[in-house]
Amino acid sequence: MKYKILAMDIDDTLLSGTSEISACNMQAIRKAQEAGVFVTIATGRNPLGSQNIWKALNIKGPIINFGGAMITDTRTGKILHTTSIENEQVQEILEMAVSLSLHAQIYQGSGIVYERENAVAISYAEALKIPHTVDPDIRKKKWDNVPKVLMFAEPGRVEKLIPELQKHFDGRIKVSASKPTFIEFNHISSNKGTALAKLCEIMDVRRDETAAIGDNTLDEEMIEWAGLGAAVGNAQPRIKAIADVITPGCDDDGVAWLINNCLLGGTE
């Protein structure tokens, strides 16, 4: 099988636990690119917050951001595809955050906006090197072009809240946990799987010519949709259950293993 696209989640998949791209992963990605595979990222981060990654990987073409809500061409900055949460739903999510006493932030342009200053938001923005704005009137304004809303909570609380929030927003908003402390809200049709399908349409690539790798529920649809879906060894159990192949973990060069054994090695 000749794979033409490899879509990789970033955090806890491509990156190690120390948030670095290993030399082994980098070398394998270079080999894949030289062999004609278009290697790209599919992440919950925004384009600016993932810029250090796609530049390091020399990705020249479409990348998937906001958990599938946006596809951007790194060569031009042009948005090729996007889905947004309606203002009424944005406000409902923000009100829900207040009722739960949780921090919530909306994504606007290249940065984030939130109601009041706090250490969690500052740390998040500084880690990703993205603009962050405090707006005390966030719940009074009309917001357009919001690809994602993010809430923060303690790990144990996230596990409890996810099914409750999914039930509350059932059929209206996609709710997922991308990290033990992150609760992500996207348009109901937004996910990495539909984004990968759209990317294939843009690039004229067949479904069976794609491979994808990830670790958590935000990667679920992408792993299911790809011709070859892989889960890293540190992936959540439900992600391992749907994967075609399980690689070593993110700290043991799982991406390199997938490339060397399945994409370039010719096995599945």
Image: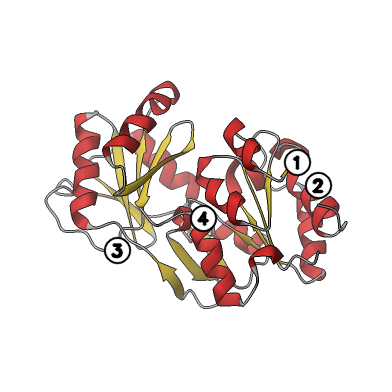
Kind of residue at badge 2:
Trp
> Along the line of sight, which residue is nearer the eye, 249 or 208?
208
**Mark 3 element type:** loop
**Residue to which mark 4 is pinned:** 192
Cα–Cα span, label 1 and label 3? 37 Å
Kind of residue at badge 4:
Lys
Colouring method of the image: secondary structure
Kind of residue at badge 1:
Thr
Residue found farthest to the right? 265
**Mark 4 element type:** helix
Q: Residue, x 28% and y 42% (percent of image)?
A: 169
**Residue to which mark 1 is pinned:** 247
**Mark 2 element type:** helix
Kind of residue at badge 3:
Asn
**Residue to which mark 3 is pinned:** 145
Among numbered discs 4 and 1, the one appearing first in the sequence: 4
Q: Residue, x 14% and y 55% (percent of image)?
A: 141
